[in-house]
Image (spheres, helix red, strand yellow):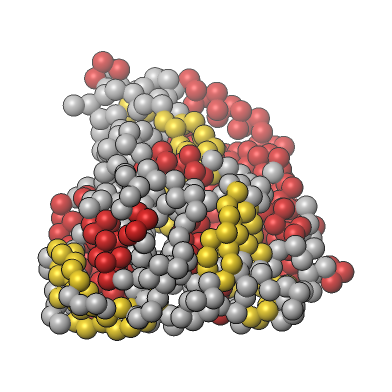
Amino acid sequence: MPMSRASSMIRHTATWIVRAIRLTAASRLATALKPTAASRLATGMPLAAAARLKMAATLTACVLTAGLLTACGDASAPDEDHLGPLVPRLVILCSLPEGNMVNYEMAQEFAEELGRIGVTMEVRPTDFAVLINTLYGEDMDYDAYTLGWSGRVERLDPDMFIHSINHSSNAVAGGNNTCRYANPAFDVLADAQRREMDPLARRKIVWEAQRLLSEDVPRITLYARANVQAYNHERFTNLISIPGEGLFNEWTPMLMEPLTDTHTVPIVASNINLTSLNPFNARSAYDWRNLRLIYDKLARLSPEHEPRPWAAAAWELVSDTIIDVELRPDMTFHDGQPVTVDDIVWSYQAWMDLPESYFASFTHPIATVEATGDLTVRFALHEPYAPFVTTTLAQIPILPRHIWEHVGDITQYANEHPVGSGPFRFVRFRTGQELVTERFDEYFEPASVDGYIFKIYASPEGVLTDLELANADLISYDLIPAHINQIKANEGGRYSHLRVTEAQDIGFFYLGMNNNRPPFDHRAFRIAAAHLVDYDYAVDVLLNGYGSRGGGGLVINAANEFWHNPDVPLYDTYHPERARQILQDAGFAWDRRGRLRLPAE
């Protein structure tokens, strides 16, 4: 039954009180803030809502009474013999708090809101590598989760966020459609936008695809986080901050220059471990940000987002379905073996033979790849594929055939000592500690630094300490709000050697729902769930304003201006009364104990 307005106000106040208690337990994230900002984070309330805390004492008794009344259920509920089955107990997998406090807190908030409508959900904080393995595993055994898609520069093209993560062909074990969304009408649009070569006509299709996603809500975008990062400007210069990636993009390690002779190997700080050194198993942005510096690609997108021939000297679009690529001469792998067209053909064919791989959406359009000369390769496509250069040539790594053709099952190969042809050569990796590289001097455009160390920390606090002590030179992830404010305040000049950078993010963080499992297989439930998310809480409180709002079904946000559809109506407002009404209208009902029941058959 829909809540009365008074009951809603009581419950919303109770929500802030519970959040205050939970966030206070995590107050170590705010210890370095100035008192006003620290109070804002530790209490879980925006400054404009601080008056709510003053009401806590007088409302506590009302909150407890309302909770007891809810637990007793509704005496006017229909005969339970005519109700559908109970909504099953659910589990949401989320980040560990030290990995992503915002995702962790939003999972807690969502579970609390579901509890208020009679659904039990357990919040299960999960190690990042375990979470990835669960989502991409054969069993597909999960209900819901929180995660994010980084805004890598290749994803300025909409194909990743339209086709790869939403097309039903990818809703399989190993595929990127981990929400298991399937809508034939959407698939038609997702396929059509790939074939359309005219950008304006293609945008029209992409906009229509976004409209369908906003109606179906396969996932709930919670927020986009501003790429606020920092680096040591007294040691290094010429760093580039790219929207969606920030500082540790594929150009900064190649272009940054040391300012002293004593610090020529920058230490890049991360609070997330790497999950795999095998390109065929790598699933996370953290893996690929390193692998793309060890392995080379035929094309790279410039800092201005323009495709550049890279390991390719040039390419020619013979027709809409034929692309000839000329390989740069005299390249070598890190073990001294030459890079040949056979390596190119083998690499692409290997990805093509894995129909459920991370890059499946970008290799499916290829019909054949063959060497046509000592330095030339021809790609024949099944049909026109508009973003072939920006999403396929710019992402598929070149692998040494002389190593990989002898390893057996390429998806199971540990690849403990990667050998690529990129600008940095692998030295060693100690899981949970560091990845060490050195400059590859034989590279056609050698880096200015002597290598880099990707250092892994247990928590953001450890990173901040090492930034302060100059034991880390730049970070590979976005600073949490408390640390942004602390560095900007620069009390006592402790952070004078650091420079803060900020860029927009075209990626997003979201609440994923397994569309193959009840209750998330009901579109109405997913829409109702989008009304149970407090988007203002995510942006104004947890991110302290360093980000933008999400919404049900949002996948291309306003930062990607050309492809974003500004006219799509989004479910982006916290409205629990509306959520209950949507459920009731769809045939859901509550029993006498206040438990939500699925629609009766």
Residue 588 as seen in the image, left or right of residue 256: left
Of residues 550 and 55, the one drawn nearer to the viewer in this rendering: 550
Q: Residue furthest top?
A: 81
Residue 28 as seen in the image, left or right of residue 165: right
Residue 29 as seen in the image, left or right of residue 116: right
Of residues 211 and 486, the one drawn nearer to the viewer in this rendering: 486
Residue 191 sits in quarter: bottom left
Residue 55: x and y, percent? 69, 43
Residue at image coords 60%, 49% = 430
Of residues 106 and 408, the one drawn nearer to the viewer in this rendering: 408
Residue 571: x and y, percent? 37, 55
Q: Quadrant of the C terminus?
A: top left
Q: Quadrant of the N terminus?
A: top left
Position of residue 478 relative to residue 373, above or below, is: above
Q: Residue furthest front?
A: 336
Query: Would residue 272 be seen by someone viewing this image from the given angle?
Result: no
Residue at image coords 62%, 32% = 62
Q: How many marks?
A: 0
Query: Would residue 401 be seen by someone viewing this image from the given angle?
Result: yes
Residue at image coords 57%, 59% = 427
Residue at image coords 80%, 63% = 469
Residue 432: x and y, percent? 61, 47
Position of residue 354 relative to residue 269, above or below, is: above
Residue 425: x and y, percent? 52, 65
